[in-house]
Image (cartoon, grey):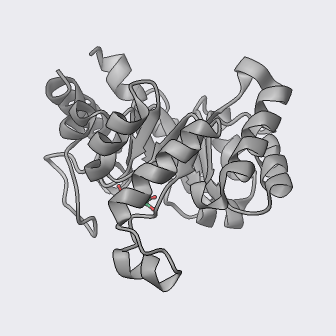
């Protein structure tokens, strides 16, 4: 794998405060990472300026808003996300087949090949078997993850967001072309923070991840740009 291919796999989690910080990281890291992940907190506080601030610095955006609503509403939200020119956007697979199909069809119809890749969240990694039982789902988490990944694929999604430990099962069920995006990645040089079930970047890519969501190991480093380079090294070394 080339360094550029490895770099494109890094999705930097922009868990920062305000537009000035977004701008600082976007300037520092465009060209060093593949994309910038804008999540609910940042989007709620800064609005679409969060996206345009990254784009002005030449960065690409993963809009991580995890839509879950009636099919018509999710489809329209996805179309609006696409109009912002983001490269990845997501929804919750638990919204069901019709919701995912309606969104995928609306985006494909309006934007064709110029569309973002659409991802589904299966079961949040914060959920346990007990969480699922509480909402009336009596199946093991791993079974639900695979079931929802297949449902997402059959409903026109391009891939899923998943824990590193679920990569193998999803790859097996959904084949080589289905995108797998994984957080919970910790480079050898970084602290684990509050992440529990982790893999290194090299391990995650070797296990079949297409993209890695990485925040604090880059953001909290003394030299974020150098940290991103070190992660590229790890992917190149471990992904062979
Ligand atoms: O700083 P860190 O690398 O832990 O950031 C990971 C990012 O991925 C955060 O934005 C976090 O919310 C997100 N995430 C996660 N675990 C999940 C789902 C999302 O860490 N299961």
Q: Residue at x 43, y 34 (%)?
A: 174
User: Which one is in front, 201 or 141?
Assistant: 141
- From where the camera sits, is residue 185 visible? no
Q: Residue at x 46, y 51 (%)?
A: 147
Quadrant of residue 139 within the rendered picture = bottom left
Q: Residue furthest front?
A: 138
User: Which one is in front, 165 or 98?
Assistant: 98
Q: Residue furthest top?
A: 2
- Residue 23 is situated, as x and y percent measured from the top left of the image, at 59, 46
Q: Quadrant of the C terminus?
A: top left
239, above or below 40, in the image: above
228, above or below 110, in the image: below
Q: Residue at x 66, y 56 (%)?
A: 96
Quadrant of residue 74 within the rendered picture = bottom right
User: Which one is in front, 38 or 16?
Assistant: 38
Q: Quadrant of the N terminus?
A: top left
- From where the camera sits, is residue 202 visible? yes
């Amino acid at each position: 794998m080339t360094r550029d291919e490895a770099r494109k796999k890094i999705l930097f989690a922009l868990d920062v405060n305000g537009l000035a910080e977004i701008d600082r990281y976007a300037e520092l890291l465009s060209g060093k990472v593949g994309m910038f992940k804008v999540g609910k907190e940042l989007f709620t506080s800064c609005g679409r300026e969060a996206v345009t601030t990254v784009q002005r610095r030449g960065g690409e955006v993963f809009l991580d808003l995890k839509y879950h609503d009636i099919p018509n509403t999710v489809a329209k939200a996805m179309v609006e996300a696409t109009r912002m020119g983001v490269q990845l956007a997501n929804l919750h697979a638990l919204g069901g087949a019709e919701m995912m199909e309606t969104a995928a069809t609306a985006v494909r119809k309006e934007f064709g090949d110029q569309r973002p890749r659409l991802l589904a969240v299966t079961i949040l990694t914060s959920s346990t078997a007990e969480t699922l039982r509480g909402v009336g789902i009596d199946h093991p988490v791993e079974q639900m993850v695979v079931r929802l990944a297949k449902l997402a694929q059959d409903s026109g999604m391009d891939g899923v967001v998943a824990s590193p430990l679920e990569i193998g099962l999803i790859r097996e069920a959904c084949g080589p072309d289905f995108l797998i995006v994984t957080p919970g990645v910790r480079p050898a040089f970084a602290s684990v923070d509050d992440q529990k079930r982790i893999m290194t970047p090299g391990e995650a890519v070797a296990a079949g991840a297409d993209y890695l969501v990485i925040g604090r190991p880059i953001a909290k480093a003394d030299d974020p740009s150098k940290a991103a380079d070190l992660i590229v090294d790890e992917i190149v070394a471990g992904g062979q």
